[in-house]
Image (tube, grey):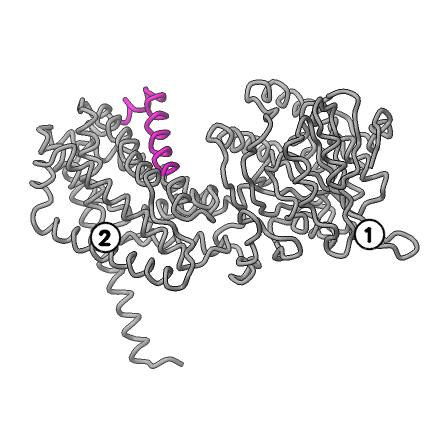
Amino acid sequence: MANPVSYLRATLSRRAGATVVLAVTAVAVVLVVRATDGAALAAAWRRAASEPISVAVALSAFAAAFTMRAVAWRRVLPSLSFGHSLAGIHLALGGNHVLPLRLGEALRVVSVVRRTPISTDAAVASSLTLRTADTLALLGWALAASPVVLFAIMGTAGWLLIGAGMAVIAAGLAWWWLRASVGGRSDVRPPGLAALGLSALAWPAEAVLVHEAAHWAGLEISAAEAVGVTALSVIAQIVAIAPGGFGTYEAAAVAAYAAFGYDPAAALVAALTAHALKTAYSVVAGGVAAAIPAPGVMATRARTSHAEAERWSGVDGRPVPDQIPTLELYVRGDAASRPPAVPLPPGGDRPLVVLFMPAFNEEASVGNCVRRAPASVLGCDVEVLVVDDGSADATAERARAAGATVISLAANHGLGNAVRVGLAAGVERGAAAVVFCDADGEYAPEELPALVGPILAGTADYVVGSRFGGQIEVMKPHRRFGNVVLTLALSAVARRRISDGQSGYRALSLDAARHAEILHDFNYAQVLTLDLLDKGYRYAEVPISYRFRTTGDSFIKLGRYLRHVVPAVARELTAGRSTAVSESALDKATISR
């Protein structure tokens, strides 16, 4: 047993801390309640309820502020995915609103370290870097909004406290970067103009909510004054003791409103309204962030070691063949008694994995993609097929020259049809796993072991490579937004957690490939997933890397995509089921090597 005296001291310390927090919170509640005009507060909330569009705008702007911070964090820590960045920030935000003394800040690091292979050092250093940038931006906005008000409210002692804190953070960051430089490597980048700009723009976005809350309370403040109130009230929360800085936030906000010449009673109503909306958003978003993206922050899973993470050092940061760490993520689904998916051909031959690439006018990239595919994976030979979907350029010639078997279609019918042909070819060959990825270089053929691993182990029948669970090098904002929205919709329809509904890197067992149905030619993503889940096949996701194409032209245009995909999903939900891939899928194809 530990030293009884030390144990007693620790217990008393925890109890004393909790007592102080509870006492301060109780005093704050009493003082705020006594000072609040209940009728005015009720009137403000009724006015907000009568303006749902304004409420939506305020909350959207508030959410946009944290989205900007998530993007900025990825600029500083490139190995962190956007999903985990956003989750870590929201988890910290929710924690700060339910825990005292701003203890929620630690959850940002905890979320990253528990859910990704990123080291604690990198998570801490990058988080401190962004918090420093946030604080500097906040002080800059406060000075810009009203330097007189800022100096009057903060006082000399406040400025000394902030200055000392910033000096400590700056010294810590300098020490960390020096150590990383001496060690020869660093996962954390100094914040560039993009990260600093996003940190700066986040505060005016937050001020939109403050501006609307003031409007509902009857205070018609200017945009600059809203930024000033936001800056001053958040600065005060640095020394918050009660959960969410309750009391401290209201006091600082009222002082700022009063300094701008507004009635303190109405200012308190505005502050309480803004704080209530912020708390509601923070608790809901924090709760979601605790579970999404999978695995949840409280889940126990096999994480890749730091040494394994170092293996991801191939060309352009992609993993090199036969060095992929074991990935044990997200395996879920029904039909747990389904036998292992690896067929053992007669005569003792090695099992075959078929990797096919649908291609339409991809002469600039298809050859490189074919050459990058491994010749064998996890004890299986690999055959690379290219389904040339009626290309008008040298796609077929470049693919054959690189060593692929080419299946040429006489005319272009669409990606969904090309995937049907590829699946049929894999089934015809009796492959242990049938895998497909795009031929435009957006996905890494070197990551094939990660895709087929769960299938060859017999733990999954359908594996999707998740870009949002891995590392995205570049994705245009409108593409990211569309992917997130469509994935959320797919998750809702499928009634299970899916992190990347539109990924172009997927693997199927022989049985799943044989029974897969794709009901239209335009695309396959959503309908294939719904079809296989409905048939009871076990679903898994593994993290993959992704880069935006640098050659050719994507077939995805948002309006056209939605016009085709939404009706196809509706047909998928109402269509009857067949039992096998149509044998006619290869009838009109020309196969050449």
Q: Amino acid at mark 2?
A: Ile
Residue lying farthest to the right in this orientation: 347
Question: Callout 1: few (<14), some (14-19), or many (20+) C-alpha neighbours within 10 Å?
Answer: some
Instruction: Look at the numbered discs 2 and 1 and tell me whether their residues touch, using CB distance below 8 Å.
Output: no
Of helix, strand and loop, which one carries label 1?
loop
Q: Position of residue 294 (x, y in %)?
A: 54, 47
Residue designated by label 2: 241
Name the residue carrying label 1.
Answer: 351
Q: Earlier in the sequence, mark 2 or mark 1?
A: 2
Would residue 243 be found to the left or right of residue 117 on screen?
A: left
Name the one closer to the observer, 273 or 290: 290
Q: Which residues are magenta?
A: 45-68
Query: In the displayed structure, would residue 580 be above or below residue 325?
Result: above
Exactly how many numbered labels are in the figure?
Answer: 2
Q: Position of residue 578 (x, y in %)?
A: 81, 30
- Mark 2 neighbour class, 10 Å CA radius: few under 14, some 14 to 19, many 20 or more: many
Q: Residue at the spot x=48%, y=42% of the render? A: 83
Q: What residue lies at 51% left-to-right and 33% top-to-bottom? A: 484
Quadrant of the rendering where the C terminus is positioned: top right
